[in-house]
Amino acid sequence: MHASTRTGPYDVLVIGGGIIGLVTAWRAAQRGLRTAVADPSPGGGAALVAAGMLAAVTELHYGEQALLALNLASARRYPDFTAELEEASGRDTGYRACGTLAVALDADDRAHLRELGAFQRRCGLEAEWLTGRECRRLEPMLAPGVQGGLRVDGDHQTDPRRLAAALLTACERAGVTLRRAAVARVLLDGDRAAGAELADGERIAAGQTVLAAGSHSARVAGLPDAVLPPVRPVKGQTLRLRIPEAYRPFLSRTVRAVVRGNPVYLVPRENGELVIGATTEELGWDTTVTAGGVYELLRDAHELVPGLTELPLAETSAGLRPGSPDNAPLLGPTDLPGLHLATGHHRNGVLLTPLTGDVMAEALTTGRLPEEARPFTPRRFAAPAGPRPASPVQEPSA
Amino acid sequence: MHASTRTGPYDVLVIGGGIIGLVTAWRAAQRGLRTAVADPSPGGGAALVAAGMLAAVTELHYGEQALLALNLASARRYPDFTAELEEASGRDTGYRACGTLAVALDADDRAHLRELGAFQRRCGLEAEWLTGRECRRLEPMLAPGVQGGLRVDGDHQTDPRRLAAALLTACERAGVTLRRAAVARVLLDGDRAAGAELADGERIAAGQTVLAAGSHSARVAGLPDAVLPPVRPVKGQTLRLRIPEAYRPFLSRTVRAVVRGNPVYLVPRENGELVIGATTEELGWDTTVTAGGVYELLRDAHELVPGLTELPLAETSAGLRPGSPDNAPLLGPTDLPGLHLATGHHRNGVLLTPLTGDVMAEALTTGRLPEEARPFTPRRFAAPAGPRPASPVQEPSA
């Protein structure tokens, strides 16, 4: 026990060592800020489950054009970010500029996808419509029934597990202190956030505190209700298959579709891993891999790429995305001086990692968010601007 | 290395420490025979994957009435065998006299299952026809579409993993020597089998040698081709779900059906495990858990019991049944003096464990198989009695 110890003061304490917390800490340390990260197992979190699609275009949803701009800004940074991170960490992150093919399995899908393609082009995005035959020429493993698809050469992938490991090493090399413990509560000093007390009793004093605890961010103790972020856990299950040498490449790019209303995607890694994702379940803190989740993923993926039945099923996993009321992240200063948020990234955490690191470092250094991130201020959910959106966060069920 | 060491002589050396090898060694030791088992990991083998149905009646296939008699004889021994083994080992084996319900999901299934019920009754077996409503009254989790079923109260279950562990302990307590090493080859002394040489060079001399290596039995070196058993690996994949307390009992007996030609069964354990099995695949020595195997089991089980989608998927596994040309085991003396077989149990290894132990101990003690086991002599496949059935054993593919 360190019940009476005090460490610091740090310039920045980041609560949460997932990819968002780590990229924030790394970028802050690069700017000369004395930075610590508190997490019982840094490098873990939802990134260990995520497939790692960098799908600014194919993840476009109607009504989310502001998020699109943010996603595109982050996607543009990925090549340079990857090069810098790999150089800083000495680790490969599995980034692959492979493109994405979103296909339609029936006439309804086809109509919907053509509309989406038109919408994408109105947004200035590049998406090319292909016939079913053209899709199969590009990806011969696709089901014979594929009716057509959108080829988006700009939507790539990275390997979130390797990304997390590289960020962890980069943090260590940049002098970030990693405290492998849970946070018991945020500490207040008058009307300012002033660091955190850990579960083992240690108190870490910091000039600025960043809450980057993913779906757990709304459960951190010590904060006034008004600044707790309205994030909730959104469960996702993914599968990892292995592509034996004899079957490679099997797929040469990410392939996705909507099967009976369920989005399913297959992300082929350079190393022969094939990730199938993902369910979207609102079940509170449950992270069980279920018979139904695995069944639906295999069923839908099988409809898209029938030949995958031969592939070894290497792993099943489940994690929690940090969902927010508008599916967009909460970035930067809050109404509590000294407290920043970097959470609520929902489906886009991997994609938004480079941009999040940059804008958080800017906010921590200057106190202001860069222009591009301002629509994503946590203050958009603050009470004074109107009724606060309901936060459907559930309590743990077990 | 023990390149020049010799151990023994033993009265009996059993090659293979799966449930069949262990029960043989245990029973032999009980009769006062000095017994050794050679296996790199005794207590392993196909039993670690098997669901453990004791399904003499519901596994009845047309044309296999001789096997039925053997299966029934072993099923009748199960209660006493279990009591004796649990007493001898101090371990629970998970035996459960729960009964089985075989159901039909469509009109064709229904016709087929009614015929099977009539055939079972002609064979003197107890099987009661139930309507769909009666089936659902018995097992409320069954799909609403169930058309009827056969209730077989005499088909029970045991937990093969616990059975294997109990047999291992019973062997140790009975003084069986366990040599944790692979067998390099069977040793011959003139025209007699005389023990085996292990992979580490040790030679174990034995008056009688029992080949009980499951699907690997045809690959043991040192034997004349004419006595190698015509067994082949028949791959089976199974799933283990967990039934949370709140859902129990979920199912109160084994439930099975044939879904689009694929047999599927759900075996609910007392401890909340639910085993779903099993695929039947002729793929040589492959033991990969595949996307297709898991998908088909979940799909078919889901059709039978839709509510299982909520259950955690705890484990996937694959193993190799020792298939024989007539789906029946090979038991007792061969044409090579000193060499016995106890292999080829195919789908019935767990069910046939008690009887196999008894008949093998008798053969090892007296040189003769008991009457009930005589149809299963390895000599039925020997060359002089006609052309030897082709053995479709495949070489390892990797």
Image: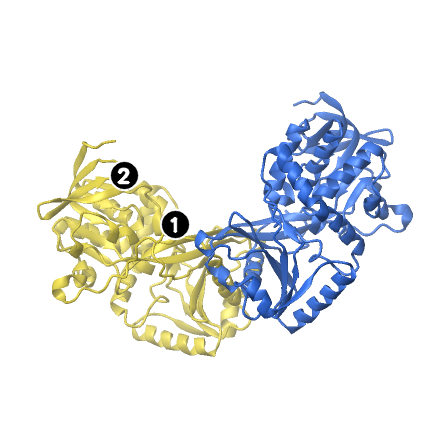
Chain colours: A yellow, B blue
Query: What is the quadrant of residue A66 in the picture?
Result: bottom left
Percent position of residue B334, x then y: 84, 39
Compared with B219, A392 (above or below) is below
Which disc is residue A48 wearing? 1
Q: Is residue B329 visible?
A: yes
Which disc is residue A219 wearing? none
Q: Is residue A284 left or right of residue A310?
A: left
First in sequence, mark 2 or 1: give its number: 1
Percent position of residue B294, x then y: 55, 57
- Nearer to me, B396 or B51: B51
- Nearer to me, A46 or B59: B59
- Please tell me which residue is depicted at 34% across the width and 60% down the height of the picture: A347
Chain identifier of the residue bearing label 2 in the image: A
Residue linked to disc 2: A178
- Please tell me which residue is depicted at 37% across the width and 43% down the height of the picture: A91
Secondary structure state at the residue bearing disc 1? helix
Percent position of residue A207, x then y: 14, 43
Q: Are marks 2 and 1 in contact (CB under 8 Å)?
A: no
Q: Is residue B62 left or right of residue A173?
A: right
On-image quarter of the N terminus of chain B: top right
Percent position of residue A274, x then y: 48, 55
Query: What is the quadrant of residue A43 in the picture?
Result: top left
Secondary structure state at the residue bearing disc 2? strand
Residue type indicated by callout 1 = Leu
Chain identifier of the residue bearing label 1 in the image: A
Residue type indicated by callout 2 = Leu
- Nearer to me, A68 or B76: B76
Q: Is residue B304 visible?
A: no
